[in-house]
Image: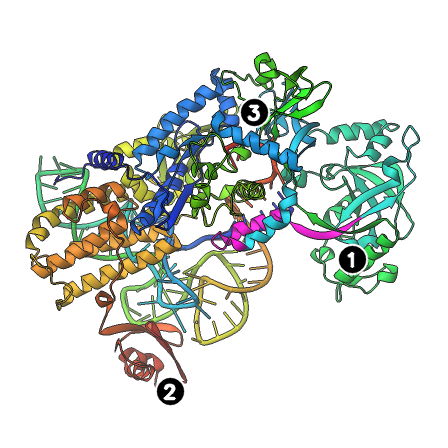
Amino acid sequence: MQEKYDHSATEKSAQGHWERTAAFQAVEDASRPKYYCLSMFPYPSGKLHMGHVRNYTIGDVLTRFHKMRGFNVMQPMGWDAFGLPAENAAIANKVPPAQWTYDNIAYMKGQLKSLGFAIDWSRELATCKPDYYKWNQWLFLRMLEKGIAYKKTQVVNWDPVDQTVLANEQVIDGRGWRTGAVVEKREIPGYYLAITQYAEELLGDLDTLENWPERVRLMQANWIGKSTGVRFAFPHQIRDAAGELIDDGKLWVFTTRADTIMGVTFCAVAAEHPLATHAARSNPGLAAFIDKCKSGSVMEADMATMEKEGLRTGLYVTHPLTGEQVEVWVGNYVLMSYGDGAVMGVPSHDERDFAFARKYDLPIVQVIETEGRTYSTDAWQEWYGTKEGHCTNSGKYDGLGYAHAVDAVAADLNALGLGDKKLQWRLRDWGISRQRYWGCPIPIIHCEACGSLPVPDDQLPVVLPEDCVPDGSGNPLHKRPDFLECSCPQCGKPARRETDTMDTFVDSSWYYARFATPGNDTAMVDARVNYWMPVDQYIGGIEHAILHLLYSRFWTKVMGDLGLVSYREPFRRLLTQGMVLNHLFSRRSDKTGIEWFAPDEVDLIHDASGRVTGATARRDGEPVDYGGFGTMSKSKRNGVDPNAMIEQYGADTCRFFMMFTAPPEQTLEWSDAGIEGSYRFLKRIWAFGNVFAHEVRPRLPATRELASAKLPETLATLRRETHLLLKQANYDLGKQQFNTVASACMKMLNALEKAPRDTALAAEVIEEAFGILLRVLSPITPHITHALWAELGYGEDILRAAWPEPLEAALAQDEIELVLQVLGKTRGAVKVPASADRAAIEALAVASEAARRFMEGKPAKKIIVVPGRLVNIVV
RNA sequence: GCCGGGGUGGCGGAAUCGGUAGACGCAGCGGAUUCAAAAUCCGCCGCCGCAAGGUGUAAGGGUUCGAGUCCCUUUCCCGGCACCA
């Protein structure tokens, strides 16, 4: 075998072997347990980044591990190919998004192949291809039929200069990213999917997802946000210009704190609320304020942190229980799209209302009291807003606790016909319309006479033209008569095609099911889907913990209700991997703003202890600002190119570094020195392969005697250590903690290098131990282990070798060492026979030299023995 | 602001059930090899202390024979917040 480790030749040869043997092609086989391992498919942004490498390495380790354990594995790969970055690239480079996307796919596929992932490429798909998105459209039409898809108005960010809708990402400090114009909120019609119809099931089924991280389930539960409250109305006599009662004379609000209803001192409505509109007609100041409310972003985080402002409408409604007049305000923090677009204001027990009342000098009436606490309107205190305590200043409700008070208030409102308890979800229906070109066309036709009609099934797919070049001023489909012009499916007259496309979350909500049934052009999925699905292991970034995963769960349930699939949840087990970070260096200048420096363009400055305190640019020697670690990104120039790493160190080194450096769920900080260390380890593995070939193999006896031989101490230790590490590695693989599996492999090699190899028995022990090491390591670094396994005569193909299990005989010990503590402080160790009982251990411990020294002659009051671990003497 | 997660040597991290804190690796230091360097190998390596020992897991408090791990308070960092994917 080769003297030196040549990563590039080793990897090329192993990849060639897998290609020739079609090693990763998955075929349905009812006789074996299946294992469907899926990593979130990439957006084809141009190049693979290290986050992808990490994600897919984790998936590959699990795939190969399960394959060796005898599972029928499937690991597919595809492309989340629609999306905004392709349009941005088109604006910048004047290249159609389709071409940019397909070029990127070709390049990134090559990168994935060079990393040696065990992917079944025959199942590859791209969501921008009509044979895939046809089924988005088909299912959308089924949802329309079932009333799950419907049309209503939505609030969007509007750029008044470019006359276009902006994504939240394109709004920077309240202004359009290209034009710098102040962004407005605008209401336009769009299609929604009624995910709230599934809220109860989406919440309840979280309990069945035992192998999802607890935090993801918690986040989803909070996102769905089931709460019971009371929806009720403030009656009024306000009439519009035509003399009609506005909203039938009722101002509806929803509250989870009906127990505080006697503390209402105002109401606040959204800027778009009919009462606001009505009042603004005769009040120019209010009209201006409403206009102002309509500028700014629609993001919830912005809404929550902005200064709460309001203006009087001069209108009054009647408190439903007291009959008092309550003033109506317009508040910039009330959203028309939430509930009824109006809230009751109880400044005494709601922090936001409290601040609002103090700002505008509104009355504050305490209606909840807690024993031992004194209420003061000077400053907000935590306990004002809790559900503990009981009603006060509330007439007949005085003395009631939260639950009873809510029941009583709801009953009284119900008797008046002005309200009742209502189950409330935080979850909102999913708006899927996007006023953008590079997405799946929504299959709707607009006819002047017949209205908006679904495209008939036999005309699917509605194919998106692939040669448009967006310029930032709106959807280029508007300028494409060949796309726009069609005939009405009902009356046959000329009609116009819908130009909105679907949210790309639609594309990613069911791709995993399509992987199971590739090539079917007559159905969305077929019977094969119920063999492979649900996905046994899903792996992806924690940033998808809510939206993508929730939408996929919803889509699955809809497909289930349509009889397309037999399962209710798509992902049996979930691993959310942490992000990959690197150092950030920047320099701020007045002229050019922030300039970012790549890590290889600077020299680090360390303090005496070795901590990084700053850096200087190599270019000019001048200092740059060190910004700590941040996610790798193109704009901040701190990305690391996987290609360069693969070329220099090989795929195995990259994979090993990724697995070794941090546990999968944590963020991973890139380190050039760290990758050197991983490379060093693989070189040592190779070097030991040489030792094995030259010094160990020749000594191996014709018939192996290891199973029956009595081993000398050094060999018994090596063997015990190896099997102990194997046991730990298997345990850690079960926990999906791969960094300690990698570390176990390093420890095995450390032990092997030190072991004697001068006898036939030693050769046998080493043969066994190195065989274990190669197999445990093989899912992480498949190429080098493939080469050594074959080269050293272990077998033809390590991928088809059985996964090793620790042997009890190898682990057995005569004598064990226990930690000795006196009063909980470690004072030494005590050796006891492995078979010693509690009394014997206590006697040995008390008699030990260290114990006598630290007990200072006092008698033992109590002795705690933790079997196999420690003995603690309390005096 | 709301929801979720996290903080352990100079650095990444380990510690399975509350039981030896710092495994494994990186960096650093010392040595071997070398004409020299690279590569490789050996040794040292939390802090204070000559040592015995003391002390130490963001900060403060609590429970326990024993706390990185459990409870309370504070603080800082990260992810998500519905049109980035």
Relative to A120, is A814 above or below? below
CB under 8 Å between discs 1 and 2: no
Q: Could you say whether the residue bearing mark 1 is in a helix, strand or loop?
A: helix
Relative to A706, is A284 above or below? above
In the image shown, does A707 or A463 lie closer to the viewer? A463
Sequence-wise, which precedes: disc 1 or disc 3? 1
Label at residue A562: none
Residue highlighted by disc 2 = A859
Q: What is the quadrant of residue A144 in the picture?
A: top right
Q: Amino acid at mark 2?
A: Pro
- Parent chain of label 2: A
User: Is residue A449 a member of the stretch shown in magenta?
Assistant: no
Visible in this render: residue A453?
yes
Marks 1 and 2, Cα distance to the nearest angstrom? 63 Å
Q: Could you say whether the residue bearing mark 2 is in a helix, strand or loop?
A: loop
Give the left or right position of residue B8, taking residue B45 as reference: right
Residue highlighted by disc 1 = A406
Q: Report the coloring of the rendering.
A: rainbow
At 26% from the left and 73% from the top, the residue drawn is A816
- Near mark 2 (Cα within 10 A), the count class, few <14, some 14-19 or many ≥20, is few
**Residue A128's x, y, as percent?**
48, 26
- Parent chain of label 1: A
Do the residues at discs 1 and 3 belong to one chain?
A: yes
- Parent chain of label 3: A
Marks 1 and 3, Cα distance to the nearest angstrom? 54 Å
- Near mark 1 (Cα within 10 A), the count class, few <14, some 14-19 or many ≥20, is many
Give the left or right position of residue A372, taking residue A660 as reference: right
Q: Amino acid at mark 1?
A: Val
